[in-house]
Amino acid sequence: MGKGGARLGKPHKGSLLFSTRNLYNFLQFKVQQVIVDTRPEEEYIKAHIKGSLEATLPLNDENPVTLDALRNLLDEKSKKEFEEKRNGHIVIVGLKERRKRVMELCETLVKEGARRVAYFEDMDKFMSKYGFLCGTGKDPGESNKEKFPGEVAPGLYLAKTGECTDEHLRKLHITHVVNMDDQKDEGGKEEVKVNMPTLKIENVKIEDDDGNVHTGSARKVVEDIEGKRKEEKSPPKILLVGGAKNFGPALTALMVLMREKNLSAEEAYEELRKIRDDLPSREKLLKKIKKLMEKEGNFIHKKKEEIEKEAKDEVEKKKGEAEKKAKEEAEKKAKEEAEKKAKEEAEKRAKEEAEKKAKEEAEKRAREEAEKKAREEAERKAREEAEKKAKEEAERLKLEAEEKKKKEEEDKRRREEEARIEAERRAKEEAARKLREEEERKRREEEEKLRKEEEKKKAIEAKERERLFVPEILLKGNKFTFQLHDRECYLKFTLFKIDGNEVMDLNHIEVPHQLDLEGRRDPIENGLCKHAFEFARTKNYLIKTSCVRPKVLANLEGFSDIILPDVVNSGGNTYYQYSRPGGTHGYS
């Protein structure tokens, strides 16, 4: 929290009274902090600092506010946040007329371990000046996460290059920016980037590349700032800005504080620490100030004559303001007296008018009362006559109503009977219709079922035909072959002789794996083998079934007369048993 604010007496060590500027600068420090607003609920709803916790102190309770009592004033969410942050920095927002009680709370918080506690009591002024840091309603809102320029003195702000956005400048109503960096950086782009047509940017450099201060430039910038800020009509708001390694802005702010508050360099540096937490080192900054003053003399502090003149001007100004205020008070008092007198005259006239009006009203009421009585008597007689006629009419209407009711009941019973007969007829017709529809539905369902079964049967037959289909088989060299779905299926053979007989040895059959997976192996092998057997018969070849599976061979019984029989081994020789007219012969 720094050391900003006025100390509130020795008994309250660790407690401060924050000014509006103190509070604004405090909110820019990223430290563990919590703000507790003790004002009445309607004041909190009207305006509060964003993120502040509502803890309205009871108006008629003058008992000391203990830590537990404060906890009980917070809701559950606020209580949790308070417990997490209460050992850090705390700001208590309250009303000026209740300062004594709230300061007792501040003292309690310090004793309970808070690092620093401050008290703030001018929320209306803070809202008017820094409304962008405030919220309304019951919701506390999010605490400020942005870092705004620090306020050195009224209308003078301090920031780093690139830290401020156009939005920040607009919210603070900045009118002048004093840029203390070089006008161009290494990339040739402007360091201060703003998009505000009304903003005036002045590029000032009070240090050379070696860090030496230009006396004339330093004097001029301080005098220019002082001159601008003394303007009575619309005094400007000035922002000093420079890079992280640039001493110029901090040095200028230091000189302004020394000059305006007549402080030593050391005292001014301590004041500046309350505003920014990223200042150049104390030793280096004070060294530059002292070197500047040794070289130029003390041009920073005002001379005695200037101070006396300013004090005299201030006295004159205050005297003028006091006279103006007294005049305004007198005019106000005279106006109030005139208004009071006019009010009394008006009340007197109003009273007389009221009495006159009351008298007239009484006479009017008396006349109205007499007229009323006469009217009431006439109305009574008329009412009795009307009641008599009404009674007779009622009797007549009653008899007519009873007769009508009796007739309506008979008509109702007749209609109900007709409706019942009609309902029974319609119910029978509806039942017959539903029965016909049900029979028709069942018939259609049966037909649909038969149709689907037929379609399914045809699909299965088509699929089986597809599976059993074998294209035209061609003889190419020593193999029978055909193409199916871009895949080749073939049966290879070798020709040789046994005792003058040509033998066709079927020694290799190829069916692609994919076709095998589709269940086509058996049809393909049957087709290839059958074609080979038919070919062999036309050529009078005998068949050796080296690669033919028994399952396929079983389908070729019509060719048993040309199939070589089983192999017989004897004495290391291989014989083929083959029966033909004239006996059984063996071939090796």
Image (cartoon, grey):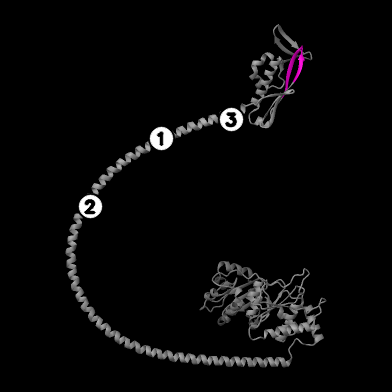
Label annotation for residue 408: 2
Residue 68 is situated, as x and y percent measured from the top left of the image, at 57, 72
Question: In the image, what residue occupies the spot 67% across and 21% down?
Answer: 531
Residue 139 is situated, as x and y percent measured from the top left of the image, at 55, 69
Q: Is residue 423 left or right of residue 123?
A: left
Label 3, residues with CA under 10 Å away: few <14, some 14-19, many ≥20: few
Question: In the image, what residue occupies the spot 24% across and 81% down?
Answer: 369
Q: Secondary structure at mark 1?
A: helix
Tell me, yes or no, if residue 88 can be seen here: no
Give the labeled residue for mark 3.
463
Disc 2/disc 1 C-alpha distance (Å): 46 Å
Label 2 or label 3, whichever comes before in sequence order: 2
Label 1, residues with CA under 10 Å away: few <14, some 14-19, many ≥20: few
Residue 160 is situated, as x and y percent measured from the top left of the image, at 72, 73
Give the labeled residue for mark 1.
440
Label 3 or label 1, whichever comes before in sequence order: 1
Tell me, yes or no, if residue 556 can be seen here: yes
In the picture, which quadrant includes the N terminus?
A: bottom right
The magenta region covers 494-508
Q: Secondary structure at mark 2?
A: helix
Kind of residue sitting beneath label 1: Glu
Kind of residue sitting beneath label 2: Glu
Disc 2/disc 3 C-alpha distance (Å): 78 Å
Q: Is residue 333 left or right of residue 88?
A: left
| Image quadrant in which you'd find residue 472 | top right
Up the image or down, 154 lies above or below 535; here it is below
Check contact, mark 3 vs mark 1: CB within 8 A.
no
